[in-house]
């Protein structure tokens, strides 16, 4: 059986104080949750250290939302994977569509970020997904396949064992338009097939999370799909009750 994850991507939201409060609220209720999912929260860089401290020894793990391509030096404004690992965080979201779209992230840069992530013992949550135009023109399969092949295919087998993939159709992010469970399953199965072509049976173990307008009301139906191993949650992860209710989507497991 594959590991199940519910990861919260806070994006550029919350002050450090609000972030600490949010994690404390999650921790207050997590004991009552019977969910079988592993919870990860990904706050902005400025709160990482503080939130790692609050979450130490609990069921919540912490991740960053990005890291630098280089290891150190004259790169004003960048935050290295080594710095992230030193806070005690364990995960890094890489290749989110907002970063591809607004900050011009390409496979070349993402390969460098992957190198940094693994050399510092962090686990990447690698995001892929098509735009609405790409879906409507039928290019979705080629687009997602390329995003997977151009980056994940450069990993060693050992690295691949420590990879989480997130399928986030761009048209479903922050729009309230969630992919149907069938659309998610179809793409997740396709991604697993692409991964299997390179890594064989190891791909059966890779967690593939769905992201895009995941809410307590739709989580259980999407998570029930065979190849959906959890969610990468934006907006709804900023509310402790909603975030935990999404994890409860795994109760039936
Ligand atoms: P929303 O859940 O707000 O649609 O965001 C999804 C996302 O981009 C998570 O990384």
Image (cartoon, rainbow, N blue to C red):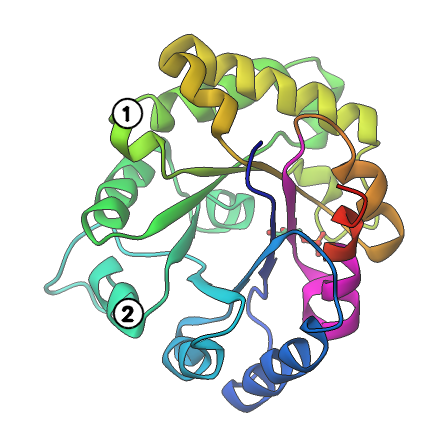
In the image, what residue occupies the spot 45% across and 24% down? 148
**37 or 149: nearer the viewer:** 37
Q: Total of numbered circles in the picture?
A: 2
The residue furthest top is 197
Is residue 81 shown in magenta? no
In the image, what residue occupies the spot 79% across and 66% down? 242
Regarding residue 78, the answer to whether it shows in the image is: no
User: In the displayed structure, would residue 37 be above or below residue 22?
Assistant: above
**51 or 60: nearer the viewer:** 60
Regarding residue 210, the answer to whether it shows in the image is: yes
- The residue range painted magenta reads 228-246
SS state under label 2 = loop
In the image, what residue occupies the spot 80% across and 62% down? 245
Quarter of the figure with residue 237 = bottom right
Residue indicated by mark 1: 157
Give how far across and how far down residue 12 sits, in percent: 55, 69
Give how far across and how far down residue 211 sits, in percent: 66, 44
Q: Tell me the number on the disc at residue 16.
A: none
Q: Quarter holding the C terminus?
A: top right
User: In the displayed structure, would residue 61 be above or below residue 145?
Assistant: below
User: In the displayed structure, would residue 27 be above or below residue 99?
Assistant: below
User: In the displayed structure, would residue 80 be above or below residue 253?
Assistant: below
Q: Is residue 146 left or right of residue 30?
A: left
Residue indicated by mark 2: 77
Q: Nearer the viewer, mark 2 or mark 1?
A: 1
């Amino acid at each position: 059986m594959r590991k199940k994850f519910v990861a919260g991507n806070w994006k550029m939201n919350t002050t450090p104080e609000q972030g600490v409060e949010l994690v404390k609220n999650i921790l207050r209720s997590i004991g009552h949750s019977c969910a079988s999912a592993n919870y990860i929260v990904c706050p902005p860089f400025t709160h990482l250290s503080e939130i790692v401290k609050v979450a130490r020894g609990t069921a919540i793990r912490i991740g960053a939302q990005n890291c630098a391509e280089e290891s150190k030096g004259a790169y004003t404004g960048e935050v290295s994977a080594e710095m992230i690992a030193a806070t005690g965080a364990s995960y890094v979201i890489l290749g989110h569509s907002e970063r591809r779209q607004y900050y011009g992230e390409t496979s070349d840069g993402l390969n460098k970020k992957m190198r940094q992530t693994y050399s510092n013992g962090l686990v990447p949550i690698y995001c892929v997904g098509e735009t609405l135009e790409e879906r409507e023109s039928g290019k979705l399969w080629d687009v997602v396949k390329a995003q997977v092949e151009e980056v994940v295919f450069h990993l060693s087998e050992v690295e691949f064992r420590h990879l989480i993939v997130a399928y986030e159709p761009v048209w479903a992010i922050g729009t309230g338009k969630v992919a149907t469970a069938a659309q998610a399953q179809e793409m997740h199965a396709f991604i697993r097939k692409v991964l299997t072509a390179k890594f064989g049976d190891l791909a059966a173990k890779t967690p593939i999370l769905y992201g895009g307008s995941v809410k307590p009301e739709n989580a259980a139906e999407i998570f029930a799909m065979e190849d959906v191993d959890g969610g990468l949650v934006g907006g709804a992860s900023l509310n402790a009750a909603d975030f935990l209710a999404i994890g409860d989507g795994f109760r039936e497991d």
